[in-house]
Every structure is written in structure tokens, then in C-alpha cells.
Amino acid sequence: MVDREKVSALVKEAKSERLEERDVLINTLHKVQDYFGNYIPIEAAEVVAEELGVPKSKVYEVLTFYTMFSTKPRGKYVIRVCVNLPCHVTGGREIVQTLQETLGVKFGETTKDGLFTLETTSCLGLCGVAPVIMINDQYYGDLTPKKLIELINSLRNGGDTK
Amino acid sequence: MPLTATTILVCAGGACISAGEESVKQTLEAEIDRYALRDVVRVVETGCMGACSLGPLMVVYPEGVFYQKLTPQAARKIVEEHILKGRIVSEYLYKMPTGEAVPEAVEKLPFFSRQVKIATRNVGYIDPSNIEEYIARDGYFALAKVLKEMTPEEVIDEIKKSGLRGRGGAGFPTGLKWELTRKSKGEKKYIVCNADEGDPGAFMDRSVLEGDPHTILEAMTIGGYAIGANQGYIYVRAEYPLAIERLNIAIAQAKEYGFLGKNILNSGFDFDVEIRIGAGAFVCGEETALIASIEGRRGQPRVKPPYPAQSGVWGLPTVINNVETFACIPPIIIKGAQWFKSIGTEKSPGTKVFALAGKITNTGLVEVPMGITLRELLYEIGGGSSTGKKIKAVQTGGPSGGCIPSEYFDTPVDYESLQKLGAIMGSGGMIVMDEDDCMVDVARFFLEFTVDESCGKCTPCREGTRQMLQILNKITAGEGTEEDLQQLETLANVIKDTSLCGLGQTAPNPVLSTLKYYRHEYEAHVKEKRCPSLKCKSLIRYVIDPTKCVGCTACARVCPVKAISGEVRKPHSIDNEICIRCGSCIEVCRFGAISKVSP
């Protein structure tokens, strides 16, 4: 059950931060997504539409256009893998393969234990230490399949993102 | 206040952080406390120093000694030896390709000595979270000069005379953009910083935002004054949380010091800046899509004209400049247009920041005068290939750009020369590829990217790129025909001519440029079903040389699909029907007995 009052409070908070109020939607969605962990329940999106006085369809179209928003619950750790050329030529293909094998999921899926969601990302701008992945807000560079497996295992065993 | 004898700059750029900068810095501070040196040694976390492959990095002043590849143990040793006893710790110094350590000051190292830093003049030298360090390096002087001594027209004139061109890729003259926007009528005007850096392989904007955020605020305020805007937006992609954090700190400090807000420096001019955060859409770097996203809508581009100078944010006149372009503004105001013009080439004055990535020894960021040749950039500064194999091509301009083969490495780097080669300057990303990289695979890779990022509004881009990708998938799978090659070329030209925005219009470039220079590779895939670079998995097989194999079983044990069989101490063999071509066996074989062949 979504706490509607909390969502309304978030919308009000987003509105209050603005010099101009018209363009508040994306920022509000970021706040709502942060509050729910890493997704936006449809019910919460409906509250956003009501509070901002915009049609639900508009919230939905924005929500689904941007890859960082999700309407499905995601894992505790969202692993975003850079799938761009600088990472590809420096061993990114093996990183993708290792991740899919180790986690047993494909891109866009979440592991059964609810720990990991695997996603792709556009270039993270850390090409100097490619291949790179991002787990939640942390970057991990110069990866090898071995380092990656160690990292995943440590997170599985309750370790923290550094 | 005690006099600081030693200042240690620790690079806190994204790459160094991911390489363990934090634990290095913590150890450094703990050691400094342990020896009670707190009063005489200052540790400063700076933005990206540029030499990303060597991180974590630090520079110890006053000598300017550059240390690389640091660990907590290294930090301990440097405090014990260098700081306490004045002995340079050679094992962490910069190494020449010969392995010789270079004890010279950081500016004299080959990676840095050829650089001319304008846009990144403060990045890696100051604490980005401290406005006073920015001010100490002439920060906000340009703003003061503009507000006290210059009319808006004079500012525009100076920028026009400098010849500064947009660093985001297209190279439109900045001064002209400002003039057009100033002349447009509108009840309000806006100035926008495009910090939606999305080109794969480009990360200069990130480094400026993280390492010198105040320069963006200062330049936007100057721009606002010049065009008559009181409101600015910085549109940052959500993938850059650190940049957002540092910008927020900078904005709060600038407000506190009176460089932003009402009546700036008592001039009567008001200006405010807000951050808008993207949410993961590459197309938002296109200016009309970016405007849509600022307004809280789907980031879809629209037809131009009208250009943002006439109708931008909320339909009002808007200037949109890239981060690096803004970063050039304050030095131009302080030192003058003539000084700026004296650097670089006639049609492309000034410097450009390049991001070196891929198979190059010194990956990272470098700022060099325009007109430098690719050879100088890739070999003298970049240190050449990192794999020991010959560099085959460099890809510039990301998914909108093209591949430049090594035969053309004596070309000077400027907007026009690169365009003539079928590539573009783009935002300055340079992805280096060696003989192991298949150009068809590279083209396919970029198309995959474009298909993913196409916003779907216009048909040529939405459907056309998808068709191109299908053909490329066929070719790399060894199922391509000669008609496919023709189809590919026709499609590429149609998409180029008929797409709505820059994304679609430039999406075929990677295919066109590789077809131009590497047609023989395409033909090998199509006619001979062979991948000359041994990259395309469907066209290669793994084989074990029975004369070299000693039967150690290492490969059979590491193979994830059990495709390798053989008795102990007898030559093994690979069943290519089962083999998934993961390459694990080649990595573990100590006898060089396994190789890839095509076909």
C-alpha cells in the first residue's frame, strides 16, 4: 500500500524548490523514486499526477521515456553496465557475459532473491578505467571477470558498496 | 595561521575514486596526524588530473612530484620518506615506456608538457568545493570585469572576435549564437548549460563539472549579462551524481559570496542558476530535446528552425552552450580575444579537450591546441598502443562520428579536417582500436547504441537504424550477402538525409566511414565468411596446436561448457560445436597452444 500522504509531501517539497513551477515533473519523479528505493509504484505516480494537476498519461509517458525510471520494483543493488565502445574494446563483452552468468539474469531482470537488477547504461565517462559498471551510486572500474565475481560475492554476503 | 610547507593534491576524479582514492587519502591523513604534521602539510582533493590509467594519483608541492598507482601502503611510504625526510619515493613515480622513473615536476612529464590548459585550467589544481581556491586563481575576475567595465555588446563582440566555436560537436560560433539571442525579442531569456554529456568515450565535461564547477557558474552569469537573461539552467545527466553534488555546493557558495542572486557585485544585474537532472536519455543532449526535458516532458527533438535563439525554453530566446565552451569564456574575457586567437588554427582557434580511451597507454583527458596532429596526440601524449599491437584506427565523435585509419594520422585535428575524413570533432572522445578490433563489429556496436537511443519520433531514424542493425548483425554472423552491402549504403544515405535531428542525421556515420576505409573487411565477412580481426564469434573457431599442447588440462578445467577434451599429458582438442568462444582457455594456457582462426 502506497503512503499517499508521503507522496503528496514529496511533490510539495519538489514544488517548493523551484524558481519556476512549470517544469517540476522529472525532479518530482526522481524524489519519489528515491523514496521508494529504486522504482515508482503506479499508485504513487497517480498521486503525482493529481498533485501536479496533470493528466496521468503525461506522467506515464515521461516515466517510461527515461531509462532511469522504473515502474517495476528493482533489486537492492541496481547494476548498470556500460555497453559502449570504450568498454567494449577493453573487455566489456566478457564483463557482460560474466554478470549474466553469475547472476543468472538478463538485462532488465532482477535476481530471484531480490538483490540484483541488471541494466545497461550509456557511457559513464570513466573510459580511462574501462570496463566500468555502476552499482547504485558507486562506480567500479578496471574490471576483470575475476574482480567482478569477487565483488558480487561480497555483496551477496552482506558486504557494502564501497 | 601556521605556514603550510607542503601541499599534497590528491586526484578525486571519478576514475581515481573507482581505483581506491578514498583509502589512499584516509591513510595519508592518518599518517600525517601520526607524525603531527597537520599544521605544515595540507591535503587537498582536486578534480580529475587527466591521467586516468595511472590512478590513484597525487602531486606533492612545492616540488610538484607526481606519484601514480597509489595504494594505502604507498601513501604511508610517501609520508615517511618524502614528507618527513625529503626523499622522493621512486617506485611510485611516473615511468617512461622504458621503465625509467621520471623525478621531474609534473608539468615536465611527457603526458602534461604538450598540454595547454584553458578550459581545464583549474581542474586538478584546486579543491572544487572551495570557492576561495577558485577566486585565488582569478576566479570571478572576468565576471567583475564584465559587470564593471563592459557593455553586453562589448562582451559579445569580444567572444565573436575570439573565434570560439561550440565544443559540443557542431562547432557553431559562440559569439554569433549570443548575438542572435540578444537580438531576439522575448519577455524573458534563458541561458542553458548542456551538461548532458553522453557521447561514448567523452568525459571532459564531467571533469570540468566535478573539478571546477565555479567556472561554469561564472561563464553562465557572463553569458546571461551579455544576452539579457536573468535565469540559467544546467542540465546534467543523472549518471553524474558527483558532478551534481559539486555543482550544488558551488551554487550555494556563489550565492553566499554574492556572485549569484540579486544585484551581483553591486551592478544591478540579477542572475540565478538552477540544476535540472536528466533521467537517462542520450537524445537529451540534442538541444531541442534538452529543452523539452527541462520543461519536464519526454526528451524528443523537434524540427529546427525556429532555433533556440528564437524559441527555446518555454518558447523564449535561449542560448545553449556546452560545458567546455563555457569553461573557455572567463579566460577569454580576462586575457582578450587576441590571446585566444593566437592559439590553435585560424578557423578553429583555442584548445580542445580530448578524452583518450580504448587501447591507448595513457587513457585520460588532455587539453591541446587545435591543429595538433592525430599522431602527436595518440603517440607523443597518449603513449601509443597499450596492447603491443599496432593501432589500426581511432574513432572520433562517438555514434555521430567516424573511424579514421592510421594512414591519416598526420591530419591536423580541427573541425574542418576531421569532417573531410568523414569523421567529426564531436565532443572530443577518441577511442583507439588495434588490429584485434573488427570494424564491422564497431559499426554494428554503434548502430546498436543508436537503435537503443532513438527517441522514436521520426521514421528514418526509428525504423531505418533498426534495419541497418539487422543487416550488420547478419554480416557479423556470416550470413551477409553482397546485396546487403548495397542496401546498407543506400539506407545509410537515406537516414542521413531525412532524419529529424542530429542523432538520426549522423547515426549512419560510423557505417559510412568504415565502409569507406574498411570495405575489404566487410567484403571478407560477406564473401569469404571470414573475420580478419578474429572478433566476430560466429566466424571464428578455437584450435589447439597439438605440437605445443602438453596436456596440462588447465583449459579443460576452465572451459565453462566442457568443450575441451583430452587425456592428461596428451594434446587436447576443442569441439567447436559446443564452444561458446569465451576465450577463457586462451587466457589460462601457458604454452600458447590455443589460437583463434577464421574461417
Image (tube, coloured by chain):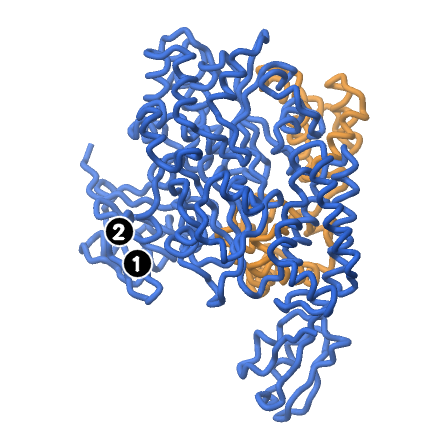
Chain colours: A orange, B blue
> Is residue B20 among what the camera can see?
no
- Counting from the top left corner in percent of width and height, residue B533 is at 61, 67
Identified at 36% across, 12% down, the residue is B150
Tally the numbered discs: 2
**Separation of disc 2 and disc 1 at Cα?**
8 Å
Identified at 49% across, 26% down, the residue is B173
Identified at 64% across, 38% down, the residue is B282
- Counting from the top left corner in percent of width and height, residue B548 is at 57, 88
Q: Which amino acid does label 1 sit on?
A: Leu
Sequence-earlier tag: 2 or 1: 2
The one of A29 and B279 positioned closer to us in this rendering: B279
Tell me whether the residue at label 2 lies in contact with that at label 1, contact meaning CB atoms closer than 8 angstroms: yes
Q: In this view, does B62 lie to the left or right of B413?
A: left
Q: In this view, does B325 lie to the left or right of A84?
A: left
Q: The residue tagged with tag 2: helix, strand or loop?
A: strand
Query: B300 above or below B490?
Result: above
Query: A44 above or below B41?
Result: above
As drawn, the label of residue B65 is: 2
Instruction: Name the residue tied to disc 1.
Output: B93
- Counting from the top left corner in percent of width and height, residue B497 is at 71, 37
> Is residue B582 among what the camera can see?
yes
Disc 2 and disc 1 on one polypeptide chain: yes
Q: In this view, does B69 lie to the left or right of B355?
A: left
The one of A100 and B346 positioned closer to us in this rendering: B346
The one of B351 and B241 positioned closer to us in this rendering: B351
Query: B557 above or below B43?
Result: below
Within 10 Å of the Cα at label 1, are there few (<14), some (14-19), or many (20+) other Cα atoms?
many
As drawn, the label of residue B370 is: none
Q: Which amino acid does label 2 sit on?
A: Val
Identified at 30% across, 30% down, the residue is B137
The one of B277 and A12 positioned closer to us in this rendering: B277
Q: The residue tagged with tag 1: helix, strand or loop?
A: loop
